[in-house]
Image (cartoon, rainbow, N blue to C red):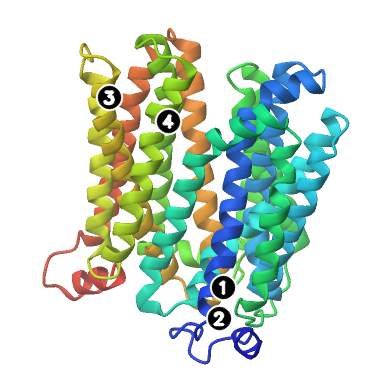
Amino acid sequence: MTSVVAAEQAPADPGSGLPQPGRTVAVVCVLTAMSLVVLDAGMANVALPSMASSLQAPPATVVLVVTAYQTALVMALLPCAALGEWLGYRRIFTAGVAIFTVASALCALAPSLPWLITARFLQGLGGAAVMALGVALLRVSVPQGRLGAAVGWNALTVALSSAAAPALGAFILAGLGWPWLYWVNLPMGALALACSRALPAAKGAGRPVDPLSVALNGLTFGSLVIGAEMAPRQPHMGALVLALGVLSLLALLRREMPKAAPMVPLDLLRGKPFRISVIASVCCFAGQTTGLVALPFYLQHELGQTLLTTGLYMTAWPLSVAAAALAAGRLADRAPTAWLCALGGTCLALGLAAMALVPLEGGPRLLVPFVMICGLGFGLFQTPNNRNMFLYAPVERSGAAGGMQGTARLTGQTAGAVLMTLLFAATTIDAAPRIGFGIGAVLALLASGVSLLGLAPRRGSTRWRRSVASHL
């Protein structure tokens, strides 16, 4: 009990982390909450047909179960980060876990589709607090020299949860029915809440959140996500919604520009290392998502695989991400991370290019090495790139860095998904996957090149040395 109480206090030195055993409990808390959010999202995708049948809803409408969650997530990331900096990371993170857990029970009890959609939106709000502040809490829980490893643990947890979600969801659906996909969240949520007392209880900076900025942020990202999804089906209406999102974004930036610590972290984005990491993240996530969306169509339509074998072949991707993320976390604490990011982006590009260009006359088994190269490349890129963002930001702006990191990820994922939707609308279902692989390879290569921009100044110059130091 004494050790847990001690762990509740903020570290005397922000770079030293928490003492043991509180540090381990804090890490378990963050990783449990992160796996809870990722598992839930993956299992919900598998359950859509069952939900449509049980709730007597058309398939096109039941997709809102996923859309509501994603929209809430992207709308709330930056506000949750700002709330964490105002009131304290632990307080907002714990509130997010509690909201997510309660919303899971509401999902399981849903008697109708509108109820379920509303509960999923509430889940997204809770999940945003977890995703925005999880790595920020890891940063103040572990010594600074172990941050790369901690980010690697987080990436490993996300990758393994992503890999396990479809199979676990299918197992629960087969034996218990879709409400149990949400009931199983309750014990994990309870564990995370029980461990949350060990999280560092550093006080917030006392900067109140601007309600108008929160409203403009929600309107911006909500309009952009909804408009992007509408554009392929209803181009004119989608364009109007996207235009509303752009206007809201301009108004938001104008309001945030004069602030010393804005909700939209313009202060961090003015720094070249942080800006490079954000742009590279958007490009790499867009390339990865393009490939992941194209891959099941390629396996089923061109290579004639069943749903089961398609899932098995695709599992190689997240498992490879997990393996690479663990190694990359350790390397990131010892090597210039710009080079690691560039190597990872290049590997992802090579894997996607191979899937686009190499004929698989020998069968789908030849695809497995290409899929593994993609996963290894993405895992090698993601961990050091995230570490760059957090180390560039001051400790008191770790929440803003986490919110921006999550926003960059979701922006890239949305762009990749919309890109594939447009390709399917413009070409045939047989041609679109290979084109998508090719475009994904270009985006991954672009992420690699952007990562190297931080090392562009002439070797030996003061600016070059500072640039390298910022990536260590």
Q: Amino acid at mark 4?
A: Leu
Where is residue 240 drawn, in percent x and y?
67, 27
For mark 4, does the 10 Å Cα neighbourhood hold few (<14), some (14 to 19), or many (20 or more) residues?
many
Give the Cα separation between the discs numbered 2 and 4: 38 Å
Mark count? 4
Give the Cα separation between the discs numbered 3 and 2: 44 Å
The residue under label 3 is: 367
For mark 3, does the 10 Å Cα neighbourhood hold few (<14), some (14 to 19), or many (20 or more) residues?
some
Residue 29, located in which quarter of the rendered image?
Answer: bottom right
The residue under label 1 is: 26
Q: Which mark is residue 22?
A: 2
Where is residue 269 drawn, in percent x and y?
46, 61
> Which residue shows up at 38% across the image and 42% down it?
319
Q: Amino acid at mark 1?
A: Ala
- SS of the residue at dot 1? helix
Q: Which mark is residue 104?
A: none
Point out the tag, 4 or 1, that comes first from the N-terminus: 1
